[in-house]
Amino acid sequence: MNRHLVIGAGPVGSGVASALAAQGTPVTVVTRSGSGPAHPLVTLVKADATDASALTAAATGAAAIYNCVNPPYHRWPTDWPPVHRALMIAAERSGAVLVMMDNLYAFGPGTPMPMAEGSAMNASGPKGSTRRTMAHDLLKAHAAGRLRATFARASDFYGPGVLGAALGARVVPKVLAGKKVSLLGALDVPHSLSYMPDVVRTLVTIATDERAWGRPWHVPNAPAVTQREAVQALAAAAGTSVKVTTVPKAMVQALGLAVPTMRGLTETWYQFDSPWITDSALTEHTFGLTATPLADAAAATVAWWKARTAA
């Protein structure tokens, strides 16, 4: 039962698989294309994440299943439910612990800051409701003894391997070039960020520690900074000077008429227009995990992007 199963090979899935393999743990990575990190201990399997039978077969004998799937942003309400159901069925049939990569959308607008694990999940929009339902499903199934489950909530990703995020491909290459950066929402309100290696460490930790099962956990994040400060930290690491501007909400709404992803951002605009701060004290105290300081994380992020550009 030492083998682990990872569903998805984006920055989270690939990061988890690579971390486990580096520890000497055999890993099976399932994706629709059969892609994933190259390592002697990583086996790549081609399968559909909505196929409960295929996932059950892959999970047989596994200690844990990591849900690192990431459907297109604007298709969460339609694409997430069948994947979620298939993963729960696989966990129930195989006995593997189901570990879900989660975010903060379930809390919704108006949530008191900072957000803790016990904060009420009051989201009512399509994406927030989808994530709220998934969290409730896991907690209910675990409490009923149908399966063992846990999940880690992260804020906006950044770091090595992160492309499609607020501080990903739209921002870091411009920072490296010293060009102007445009961001969504307010530039000078605090916003928690989740550094990818910290996300990976949290998932790997809660998968095998029985204290984690049956409840959510927050990824340890460095103290919240403003979006402007986050960009300046990247610029300092890159040795550049960058002007930071904001994209008006009206422009996002106009673009949303033609671009589904931009349309989806209007639902979660509150996350960037008001303070968005996490409390990860419970995770830190329980498992001894700590967040990587922003300056160190920014330096590693810039180094990864420079290496990627050179390659």
Image (cartoon, rainbow, N blue to C red):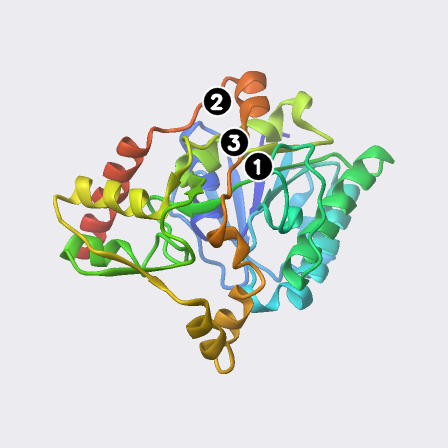
Q: Disc 2 and disc 1: Cα gap in Å?
A: 22 Å
Q: Is residue 118 above or below residue 251?
A: above
**Residue of label 3:** 202
Name the image quarter holding the N terminus: top right
Q: Nearer the viewer, residue 102 or 146?
A: 102
Circle number at residue 132: none
Would residue 85 appear left or right of 229 to someone viewing this image? Answer: right
**Which residue is rendered at x = 26% and y = 53% of the image?**
172
Image location (x, y in percent) of residue 245: 29, 59
Q: Disc 3 and disc 1: Cα gap in Å?
A: 22 Å
Are discs 3 and 2 less than 8 Å apart at CB?
Answer: yes
Q: Nearer the viewer, residue 60 or 157?
A: 157
Circle number at residue 289: 2
Q: Disc 3 and disc 2: Cα gap in Å?
A: 8 Å
Circle number at residue 113: 1
Image location (x, y in percent) of residue 276: 51, 43
